[in-house]
Image (spheres, rainbow, N blue to C red):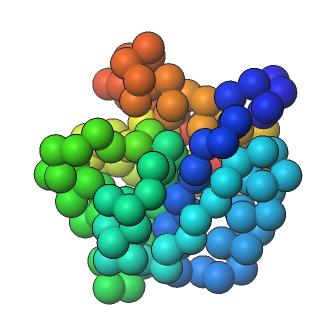
Amino acid sequence: MDPRDFSAAKLVLVVDDDPDFCLVMSQLLRLCGFRVAIAANGVEALALLPKHPVSVMMTDLFMPRMDGIELLRNVRKRGAPSPAIIAVTGDLHAGRETTAAAAGLLGAHAVLIKPFNKHQLLQAIEVATAAAAGTLPTDSPLVAG
């Protein structure tokens, strides 16, 4: 899969409290042809969403101030068109299926479990974008990582 086939000018919002993760994701996504915005938590993400045409939002589920779970609830309540959503977690205590099910109920179209690779990231973006556009069923999100 060539990322240029579906990345043209798409803005990806990376929401994570880990600055190193944000830096790596920013560099990787830019190399794949995406534009990137960064938010350190859900509060910052909610402030950015109405101001920028975000195509894909990748959010960590567990962060200080406003976590990804609360962010997903708020995005869903906004009523405005929402971006394709990828939930990201490094916490495997709940288990893959439980994490995916919870994220799916809150509106995530895909789930990435850290660590994940470039192929899994691009696959999650492609699946989440298609699911958000209504061209894929969204009853069970893609889980990768």
The residue at the point 36 percent across, 25 percent down is: 138
Q: Looking at the image, which residue sits at the far top?
A: 135
Q: Looking at the image, can residue 143 be seen?
A: yes
Judged left or right of residue 74, residue 72 is right
Left or right placement of residue 121 versus residue 82 in this view: right
Q: Nearer the viewer, residue 59 or 54?
A: 54
Q: Where residue 7 sits: x, y (%)?
A: 69, 36
Q: Is residue 1 left or right of residue 71?
A: right
Lateral position of residue 140 relative to residue 143, left or right: left
**Which residue shows up at 83% across the image and 27% down it?**
2
Residue at x 14%, y 51% (from the top left corner):
77
Q: Which residue is depicted at the point 78% across and 33% down? A: 3
Q: Position of residue 85 (x, y in %)?
A: 43, 45
- Image quarter where the N terminus lies is top right
Q: Position of residue 75 (x, y in %)?
A: 26, 54
The image quarter in which residue 144 lies: top right
Q: Is residue 22 above or below residue 121?
A: below
Image coordinates of residue 96 in percent, x first then y, are 48, 47
Tally of numbered tags: 0
Q: Decide: is 9 above or below 123.
A: below
Residue nearest the observer in this picture, 18 or 13:
13
Above or below, 43 relative to 53: below
Residue 111 seen in the current view: no
